[in-house]
């Protein structure tokens, strides 16, 4: 249920760093004890990015340890 | 999930009601795109990110404008045209930073803050009521109540004799550190007092959010069955004390205390377990003794 807030936080973090450059994709590192459901997060990601500068950016997942829950990196579009 | 629980509602608001004055204030209104432009700009400054200002007035730039204070984001600075930018930014960092500030505030004041979590109906409010009544005249207790709607719980706490702030999270399923920061300042708990935070009844989400408390305490009740700790291991791992409430009903609902204790130990071998009945007062003293012992450590 908290995945919506998490998706908003991810969008805010990436939006602040990208500063208007077009983002192709974002990768999030999630550990087995992070208490985050990936499907729910992906669902919320589409909702929160719709109509924003991050619209269309994919959300990918990277395996991590323990309670890790971080924005690992994001990819800028070549044509940006 | 979010489509079901309703937290996707963009009009969701979080409010705080001071039970003494009856005044309600808004803690949070929705920001669908994350931060406002002003906040994003403030963040860029704070982190030394390169960014542009539109100057529609003249002023002398005779100072070095390098924003160089040892907090570089080197990847962000180099990847201007395509490529991958490494961040490694903790997604809960904002909440955790506020929680740490709360923790320092509580420690500086000598206030013991405890975060009570349970499923709805386990008896958190009843336990707080019994605690407030039993310790009346011995220790000052203030309470932060978290619920999606209504001030029913804060009304009960106030009737039991403690100052209370009700936070209504709207569609939100847990308390966050910034809400507790606002409520704690409004309550102004005196040194040596207990600040009891009753989280939203939910065994999932509150496990993730540090509020700055000294510890989390789970309340489960005999009517819920013995396997709650196995079903919600994240929560039972996050707590230091588990209170098994409604022990007066145990014989009537076939509750097996030994099995429940074993299940708690399976997910959290270090958890302290206290069995009691908030309603009848059965073994309440064990909890009160432990609480006063914890208070002695602050």
Image: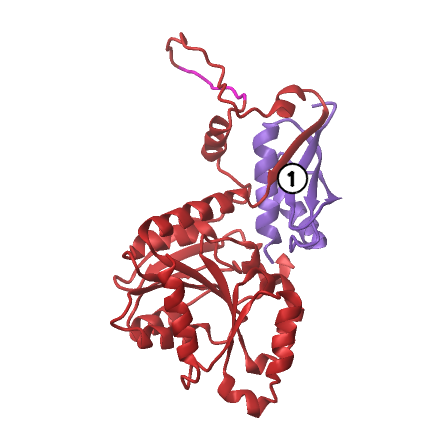
**Of B189 and A10, the residue lying toward us:** B189
**Of B1 and B226, the residue lying toward us:** B226
Residue span colored magenta: B50-56
Provide residue B130's location: percent of width, then percent of height.
Answer: 37, 77
**Of B100 and B60, the residue lying toward us:** B100
Badge 1, how many Cα within 10 Å: few under 14, some, many 20+? Answer: many
Q: Which chain is red?
A: B
Say if residue A19 shows up in the picture.
Answer: yes
User: Against A37, is B33 above or below?
Assistant: above
Provide residue B30's location: percent of width, then percent of height.
Answer: 49, 48
Q: Which chain is purple?
A: A
Provide residue B69's location: percent of width, then percent of height.
Answer: 48, 22
The residue sitting at 47% across, 80% down in the picture is B276
User: Against B145, is A42 above or below?
Assistant: above
Q: Quadrant of residue B42?
A: top left
Provide residue B298's location: percent of width, then percent of height.
Answer: 37, 56
User: Against B199, is B221 above or below?
Assistant: below
Magenta segment includes B87: no
Magenta segment includes B54: yes
């Amino acid at each position: 249920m908290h995945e919506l807030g998490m998706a908003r936080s991810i969008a805010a973090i990436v939006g602040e760093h990208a500063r208007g450059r077009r983002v192709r994709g974002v990768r999030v590192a999630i550990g087995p004890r992070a208490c985050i459901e990936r499907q729910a997060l992906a669902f919320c990601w589409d909702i929160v990015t719709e109509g924003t500068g991050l619209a269309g950016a994919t959300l990918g997942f990277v395996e991590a340890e323990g309670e890790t829950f971080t924005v690992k990196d994001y990819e800028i579009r070549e044509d940006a | 999930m979010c489509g079901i629980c309703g937290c996707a509602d963009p009009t969701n608001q979080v409010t705080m009601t001071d039970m003494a004055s009856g005044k309600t204030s808004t803690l949070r209104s929705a920001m669908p795109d994350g931060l406002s432009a002003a906040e994003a700009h403030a963040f860029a400054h704070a982190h030394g990110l390169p960014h542009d200002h539109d100057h529609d007035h003249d002023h002398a730039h005779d100072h070095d404008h390098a924003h160089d204070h040892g907090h570089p984001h080197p990847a962000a600075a180099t990847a201007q045209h395509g490529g991958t930018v490494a961040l490694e930014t903790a997604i809960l960092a904002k909440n955790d930073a506020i929680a740490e500030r709360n923790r320092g505030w509580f420690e500086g004041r000598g206030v013991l803050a405890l975060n009570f979590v349970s499923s709805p109906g386990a008896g958190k409010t009843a336990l707080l009521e019994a605690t407030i009544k039993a310790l009346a005249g011995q220790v000052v207790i203030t309470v932060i109540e978290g619920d999606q709607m209504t001030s029913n719980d804060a009304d009960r706490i106030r009737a039991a004799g403690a100052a209370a702030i009700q936070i209504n999270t709207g569609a939100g399923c847990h308390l966050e550190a910034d809400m507790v920061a606002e409520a704690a300042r409004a309550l102004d708990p005196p040194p040596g007092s207990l600040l009891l935070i009753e989280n939203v009844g939910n065994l999932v989400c509150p496990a993730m959010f540090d509020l700055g408390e000294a510890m989390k305490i789970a309340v489960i009740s005999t009517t819920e069955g013995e396997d709650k700790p196995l079903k919600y291991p994240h929560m039972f791992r996050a707590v230091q004390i588990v209170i098994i409430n409604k022990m007066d009903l145990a014989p009537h609902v076939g509750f097996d205390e030994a099995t429940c204790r074993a299940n708690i130990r399976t997910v959290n071998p270090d958890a302290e377990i206290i069995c009691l009945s908030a309603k009848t007062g059965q073994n309440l003293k064990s909890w009160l003794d432990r609480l006063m012992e914890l208070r002695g450590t602050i």
